[in-house]
Image (cartoon, grey):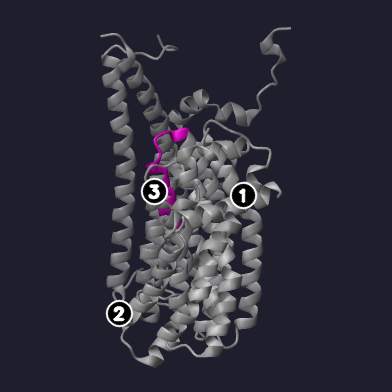
């Protein structure tokens, strides 16, 4: 069980920093995916289809 | 004159005609060394202690400065296309450029190093070791630089990127080069490592660079 | 004999790796993979923060190791994946290889940066400074520079296919140089730092430390795989969108 100590602040910062950046990374990857899906949907809506999908 | 020598000779002639490049490089090298005391203070002991590192960084920066003109002019005027299709293998042409580039950048730096040694309060023995280290290590710097230049030749603004790519590769050269001069116990080992690094990188460079040149034009 | 019957039968790898098939099989994998990742993280954090003892040498700060070591491991593992993908691009001309390379680079860079960040926070309470030019941290910093250079190179090209091949060359050269850098930095270190406090993950690890460590490593590795698959899909879709846009532009009004 984690106990309070002088070093707790470092542990907190480490987990907080790693956690935040990891979540940001997940968010960035997910946002990029969403962006391209939207773009494809927009193109689709304009009636442009892949030749193989037509 | 065989084809390889012709490539080297061509590079040298172009550089001689192009005029100021080599002198500019030497000037830059000396100026970097001269500027450092302004930044860290003129105390002779400090300078003497930092001198090997400063000389090496100056040499490294000077090499980086000359990278862009390795391939760019040839790419622009179509010479690279000719070299790719020539009977002389592209690897040999690159090797020729490597040799010429070393002659044009490393030798002048070597020749100017005594000046830097005086400016940075190096004693003669240190300078001697520095000169030897530069002689043994600059081939590796040049080899890595050639690879970086070949990789970025097809980019419009590739000149900014080549130093970024080349720098991590050159770290071992800096480490061993400075150690050869400054490290009390390690200089013998450093000499061996440095020489090995130069030999391997020079041998390997034409293949990697030629591959990058070919891929950049596909 | 028709052309089809003359072609060699695809093995399991080429069936998986075929671009069309890839989009097909990767989609249903994402959600299970995501759930598994989340579960492992939950378990790992539980072990790391609550269900494990403090180290008798390092005290509570050993808990930082549970986020530092996975990121350090990933920084090298992802480069290894990029290296294999680079070989795929250059040697086998595999169509998905450059997509894999491109997806992995920013992920690897982030994990490397996190390794440095967590390592600094571990170093401060353990041996007094945020940064030491020791062999491991210095090599990791250089690795970060290489990752960032590769990312910059990707962005400098207009044509992703040509970019993939050139980046592959740089990745391979980097891969050959990284051991040299590691060696030289370690050697440089022995010259300059006689005090070797640097037994980063050296101390003998009792089982109570291994459990949270392995769970966190597994969690992070699955996270990388998840993000890698999503990024690869995004890149493929992006190229599809580019092609369609160009088709649209070329259409008569």
Identify residue for label 2: B39
Q: Which residue is mark 3?
A: C152
Q: Which is nearer the eye, B162 or C73?
A: B162
Q: Position of residue B156 (x, y in %)?
A: 38, 42
Q: Main secondary structure of the magenta part?
A: helix
**Residue at the image position 66 percent from the left and 68 percent from the top:** B196
As drawn, is C211 to the left or to the right of C34?
A: right
* Tag nearer the camera, 3 or 2: 2
* Separation of residues labelled 3 and 1 (CA atoms): 32 Å
Of label 2 and label 1, which has the lower sequence position? 1
Return the chain for callout 2: B
For the point 38% across and 33% down, the residue is C234
Q: Secondary structure at mark 2?
A: helix
Q: Do pointers 3 and 2 mark residues of a single chain?
A: no
Q: Which residues are magenta?
A: C146-161
For discs 3 and 1, the disc positioned in front in the rendered view: 1
């Amino acid at each position: 069980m984690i106990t309070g100590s002088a070093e707790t602040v470092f542990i907190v910062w480490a987990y907080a920093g790693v956690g935040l950046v990891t979540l940001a990374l997940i968010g960035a990857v997910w946002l990029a995916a969403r962006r391209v899906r939207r773009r494809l949907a927009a193109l689709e809506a304009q009636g442009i289809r892949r030749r193989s999908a037509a | 004159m065989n084809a390889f020598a012709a490539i080297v000779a061509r590079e040298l002639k172009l550089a001689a005609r192009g005029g100021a490049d080599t002198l500019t490089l030497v000037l830059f090298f000396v100026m970097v060394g001269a500027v450092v005391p302004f930044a860290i203070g003129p105390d002779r002991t400090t300078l003497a202690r930092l001198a090997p590192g400063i000389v090496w960084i100056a040499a490294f920066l000077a090499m980086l400065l000359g990278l862009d003109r390795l391939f760019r002019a040839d790419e622009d005027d179509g010479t690279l296309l000719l070299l790719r299709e020539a009977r002389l293998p592209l690897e040999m042409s690159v090797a020729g450029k490597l040799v010429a580039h070393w002659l044009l950048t490393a030798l002048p730096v070597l020749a100017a190093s005594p000046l830097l040694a005086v400016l940075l309060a190096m004693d003669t023995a240190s300078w001697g070791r520095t000169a030897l280290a530069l002689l043994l290590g600059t081939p590796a710097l040049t080899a890595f630089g050639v690879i970086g230049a070949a990789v970025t030749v097809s980019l419009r603004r590739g000149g900014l990127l080549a130093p970024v790519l080349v720098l991590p590769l050159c770290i071992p050269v800096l480490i061993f080069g400075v150690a050869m001069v400054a490290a009390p116990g390690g200089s013998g080992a450093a000499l061996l490592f440095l020489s090995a690094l130069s030999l391997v990188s020079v041998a390997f460079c034409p293949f990697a660079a030629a591959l990058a040149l070919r891929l950049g034009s596909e | 004999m028709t052309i089809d019957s003359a072609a060699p039968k695809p093995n399991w790898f080429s069936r998986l790796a075929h671009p069309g098939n890839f989009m097909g099989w990767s989609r249903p994998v994402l959600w299970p993979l995501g759930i598994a990742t989340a579960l492992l993280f939950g378990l790992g954090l539980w072990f790391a923060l609550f269900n494990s003892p403090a180290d008798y040498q390092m005290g509570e700060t050993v808990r930082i190791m549970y986020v530092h070591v996975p990121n350090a491991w990933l920084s090298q593992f992802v480069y290894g994946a990029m290296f294999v993908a680079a070989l795929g691009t250059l040697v086998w001309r595999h169509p998905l290889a450059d997509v894999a390379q491109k997806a992995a680079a920013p992920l690897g860079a982030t994990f490397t940066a996190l390794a440095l960040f967590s390592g600094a926070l571990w170093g401060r309470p353990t041996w007094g400074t945020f940064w030491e030019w020791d062999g491991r941290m210095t090599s990791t910093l250089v690795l970060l520079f290489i990752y960032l250079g590769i990312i910059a190179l990707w962005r400098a090209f207009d044509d992703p296919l040509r970019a993939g091949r050139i980046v592959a060359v740089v990745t391979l050269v980097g891969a050959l140089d990284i051991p040299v850098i590691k060696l030289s930095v370690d050697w440089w270190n022995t010259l300059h730092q006689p005090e070797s406090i640097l037994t980063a993950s050296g101390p003998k690890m009792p089982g109570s430390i291994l459990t949270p460590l392995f769970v966190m490593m597994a969690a992070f590795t699955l996270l990388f795989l998840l993000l890698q698959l999503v990024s690869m899909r995004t890149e493929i879709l992006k190229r599809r969108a580019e092609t369609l846009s160009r088709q649209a532009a070329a259409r008569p009004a």
